[in-house]
Image (cartoon, rainbow, N blue to C red):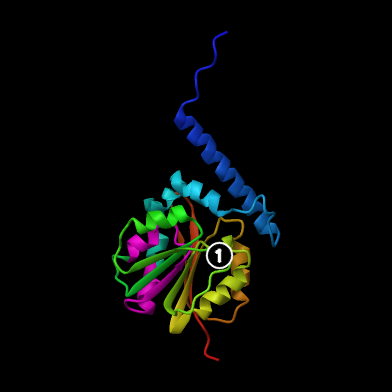
Amino acid sequence: MTPPPPTPAHTWDKVLRSARRARSHLYWGLKSRFASVPDGIRLNSSQWDAEYAAGDWERLDAITEVAHYMVILGFLDYAVPRPKVLDIGCGHGRLTRLLALFGFADYLGIDISAEAVRQAQSLAIPKTRFEVADMNHWDTTERFDVVVLNESLYYSENPRDLFERAASWLTGEGVVIVSTFRQSPGSRRIWSQVDAVPTKPLAACSVTDDATGHTWDVRVMRRPTW
């Protein structure tokens, strides 16, 4: 009996990528309905590393993603010219590359994935720093003009707590910018938790890419004057 031909490497890549996405979808389905997710399903640093190493997140570099990034950058530049920026969940540096076109005083990006941070550091953009850190437990004594939470709050164990901590890291006139992908199962829950925190809203908009139908909601907020 002739053995079956070996499965091509590119086919296995597709299978593994589909498996990673299936796990992510299960995670989102549970996260949207329950406050916590079992440890066996929760996304961990090893899974993030595998996804970034495989290029799964290069889809963020697509032209269909550009519009909502431009809104973030517009809000950021309007709030404080040449700001000191904290990017929570910076990934492989997509926002960093675009931000470099606008100019900034200092940039710190944190991400749980060492592979994502390695890719971001390889961009070698001046005045940038990166840390491998879990946003659920990370803290700092530094203060920033802008804190960006770009599609990262729904990965937090406690989105409201993370948002409150983000606001506490601001300078006096600093702003928090939050962007979420509306089609994410956890998006509605995220905004309900953000709205529960006293802030001074400055602007908000929704951005839809007509080609994909994908929509992002972006808001910029300042701490209220007590």
- Pick the quarter of the image with the C terminus: bottom right
Residue occupying image coordinates x 65% and y 50%: 41
Q: How crowded is mark 1: few (under 14 residues within 10 Å), some or many (20 or more)?
A: many
Could you say which is closer to the camera, residue 62 or residue 35? 35
SS at mark 1 in the image? helix
- Does residue 209 appear anywhere in the picture? no
Spot occupied by residue 115 in the image (x, y as percentages of width and height): 44, 52
Residue at the far top in the pictured view: 1
Can residue 76 be found in the magenta stretch? yes
Reading the image, the residue beneath label 1 is 153
Residue 98: give x, y in percent of width and height: 33, 62
Q: How far across and how far down the image is residue 155, in percent?
A: 57, 60
Residue 108 located within the stretch drawn in magenta: no
**In the rendered structure, which segment of residues is drawn in magenta?**
73-99
Residue at point 50%, 21% (across, down)? 6
Residue drawn at x 48%, y 52% is 213
Looking at the image, residue 118 lies above or below residue 11: below
Residue 38, position as x, y percentages in the image: 70, 54
In the displayed structure, 39 sits above or below 22; it is: below
Residue at x-position 38% and y-position 50%: 62
Quarter of the image holding residue 162? bottom right
Q: Measured along the vertical axis of the image, is residue 22 above or below residue 90?
A: above
Instruction: Count the marks.
Output: 1
Mark 1: amino acid: Leu
Along the horizontal axis of the image, is 183 left or right of 122? right
In the shown orientation, is residue 106 left or right of residue 43?
Answer: left
Does the rendering let one see residue 88? yes
